[in-house]
Image (tube, grey):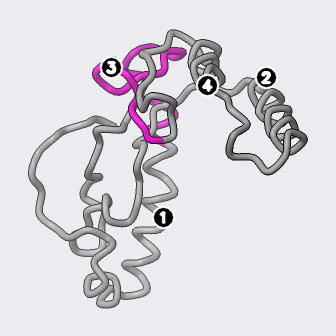
Amino acid sequence: MSILMTRIPGKDLGDAELYEGMTDDERESIFAELRCNPQVMRRRFHPRGKEQICLVLGTAVKSVRIPSHAVGPCESESEFNDHLFSSISGHSFETREKFEEAVGIAERLRTMRHPIVFTHGDLKHYNIVVLDGRILGFLDCESAG
């Protein structure tokens, strides 16, 4: 598994004409690749080490779901979680009880350990390039890390 940024032929999987024109065998082949490719990425590719949370180039993770829209790079999951928890606010909850319940769930999730893995970050149908019933590549990798 490697990352190569280049122009490639094909159409995105979100193209209705492309998808409707595929045979059942082509669709099944693509679904099989979609099950396999992310697993391979997650198992084999650790560009910055097994614990660091960052983008491929070692820069901050950027997302509208993150307070201030960027964090890191973080040397550990704990550091990443500390940033996420730093701006917890109950203003969007109907009641204080619902807010506290959500925080409790988040705290329990925070204690669960799991491997830090490489991921695309935005793997949607329109970011998957297909040609002749095969996946050629993934677009929009700026969120990968």
* Residue 71 spot, x, y in % from top left: 45, 22
Indicate which disc, 1 or 3, sits on the residue closer to the N terminus. Answer: 1
Indicate which disc, 2 or 3, sits on the residue closer to the N terminus. Answer: 3
Q: Quadrant of residue 55?
A: top left
Say which residue appears at 11% left-offset and 45% top-offset: 6
* Residue 139 spot, x, y in % from top left: 26, 52
Q: Considering the numbered disc 4 on the image, is that residue within a helix, a strand or a loop?
A: loop
Q: Are marks 1 and 2 in contact (CB under 8 Å)?
A: no
Q: Considering the numbered disc 3 on the image, is that residue within a helix, a strand or a loop?
A: loop
> What label does residue 59 carry, if any?
3
Q: Nearer the viewer, residue 89 or 4?
A: 89
Query: Up-down: is 109 above or below 24?
Result: above
The residue wearing badge 2 is 111
Indicate which disc, 4 or 2, sits on the residue closer to the N terminus. Answer: 4
Q: Left or right: where does residue 132 sit relative to residue 79?
A: left
Say which residue appears at 33% left-offset and 73% top-offset: 14
Say which residue appears at 45% left-offset and 30% top-offset: 44
Q: Are marks 4 and 2 in contact (CB under 8 Å)?
A: no
Residue flagged by tag 2: what amino acid is it?
A: Thr
Query: Up-down: is 36 above or below 71?
Result: below
Q: Which residues are magenta?
A: 40-64
- For mark 4, does the 10 Å Cα neighbourhood hold few (<14), some (14 to 19), or many (20 or more) residues? few
Q: Are marks 1 and 4 in contact (CB under 8 Å)?
A: no
Residue flagged by tag 1: what amino acid is it?
A: Ala
The residue wearing badge 1 is 32
Measure the alpha-carbon separation of dots 1 and 2. Answer: 33 Å
Measure the alpha-carbon separation of dots 1 and 3. Answer: 32 Å
- For mark 1, does the 10 Å Cα neighbourhood hold few (<14), some (14 to 19), or many (20 or more) residues? few
Of the residues tagged 1 and 2, which is closer to the observer? 2
- For mark 2, does the 10 Å Cα neighbourhood hold few (<14), some (14 to 19), or many (20 or more) residues? few
- For mark 3, does the 10 Å Cα neighbourhood hold few (<14), some (14 to 19), or many (20 or more) residues? some
Residue flagged by tag 4: what amino acid is it?
A: Ser
